[in-house]
Amino acid sequence: MTAILRQIPTVTAASMILLSKVSGFASPGLRAFSLLPAAAGLTAVLLLSSRGDASPVHKGMAAYAVGMAAGAWLLPAGAVALLSRLAAATLYFVLFLMAILPPLLGEAPFTTWFARRDTPEAIWHTELFRRINRHLTGLWAGLFAVGTVSGLLPWIFGIRGFLQGAIFEMLLPGILLLGVGVPANTLYPRYCQRKSGLTPTGRGTGRTEAPAGQPDPFTGNIPDQKENGEMKANRTVVAVNGSPHAGIGNTATMIGMLQESLAAEGIAVETIHLCDHEIEYCIGCGHCMEMGKCWIMDDHARIAERLLAADGVILASPVYFYHVTAQMKAFIDRSLALGHKPRRTWKPGLAVSVSAGLGETQVAEYLAAMLRAYGAFAVGRLTALATSPGEFIGKKAV
């Protein structure tokens, strides 16, 4: 039933154009007949609205049908004749107003109604979502404006004949709407998502597995590598430091100890201090499970890509209330899509944790488990006790 109701506003608008072209509302009987499509369109929109299925386009079509019927009854005969001749241009103008008025009044663009039906609510508040819909609404407003002008051309240049008028009033606008607007609804959001480093959503855009022995399209790594714990020389290890003290804390000191040892083996260590980057909290939308990456536009994606491309991974954090720091937890939480579908590569990883007395072993175990999200396995866990920067308790590190 709902599917039929969705078609009625479009059918009534088309019927109103045909009726006005054929009859010009020249008699009271024909004017009375115009009330039928107007009533049908209005009823369909009211029923759809009660179900939450009335789109801005449905409302625009119904408003057009009602407006045309009202004009046929209320306007003078000369104005009715002109309205009948400009019926198609009037429809495009109504749709143009539907597109531009909401943004001008501070409301959401009309394309947002359609986009929200395919995305989780949490995504609606992202800047990328808003920007895509602003641009698409601008495109559609431009297409409706062109349709309006095209529909006016037969009247401006005195073009007579049903077929000649149909070229400007139906054919040309239809080509633009179907050939430009409809494809843009699919292609432009995908383009924007790819440009932002995201895997596009939508039908036919899901990620596929790479053939055996071929690089994974997302990570660039070759699948089915063996877990052997070996690393060739001249490779890079990426260390993520979750401490809020960046390079002056005990966690950074421990990474520095590893850096010296690895450098002797020809292995470079790139340290990323999370406190120097913008990492928003996970909002629990779950949309990354479909996209392969998080929607939120900050530094997380770039850091995660560095970990995926690295030859080895170090996750390091001090103990804060028996767990990793808020910075590290936010980063790991945002890696949900990567952890849900572990990488098919196996490279060495290390978990590093330091506490003032308790919890370093448990935190190291947690970080070791999280290494799998970035395609690594734990070759070990490095833990330490320290009450002040550089004041490690126990045996001196060698």
Image (cartoon, rainbow, N blue to C red):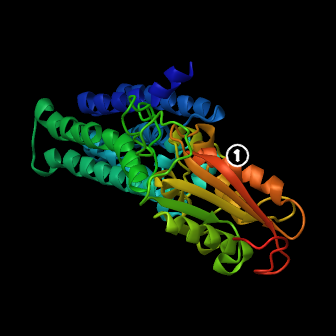
Kind of element beneath mark 1: helix
Where is residue 322 drawn, in percent x and y? 86, 59
Closer-to-camera residue (332/356):
356
**Left or right: 184 with respect to 40?**
left
Q: Residue furthest top?
A: 1
> What residue is shown at x 60% (from left), y 52% (from top)?
349
Apparent side of residue 16 relative to residue 339 in the rendered image (left or right): left
x, y percentage for residue 9?
45, 31
| Residue 1 or residue 288, whichever sits in front | 288
Depth check, front residue: 316 or 158: 316
Q: Is residue 284 left or right of residue 167?
A: right
Circle 1 residues within 10 Å: few <14, some 14–19, many ≥20: some
Q: Position of residue 264 (x, y in %)?
A: 51, 68
Residue 383 in which image quadrant: bottom right
Frontmost residue, 331 versus 91: 331
203 lies above or below 67: above
Residue type at mark 1 is Ala
Q: Which residue is mark 1?
A: 369
Location of residue 26 (image quadrant): top left
> Could you tell me which residue is drawn at 58 percent across and 63 percent down?
239
Q: Residue furthest right?
A: 357
Q: Quadrant of the N terminus?
A: top right
In-image side of 258 versus 389 (left or right) = left
One can see residue 216 in this view: yes
Tell me the residue at 68%/52% (across/down): 380
Is residue 282 something that shows in the picture? no
Q: Is residue 258 above or below residue 44?
A: below
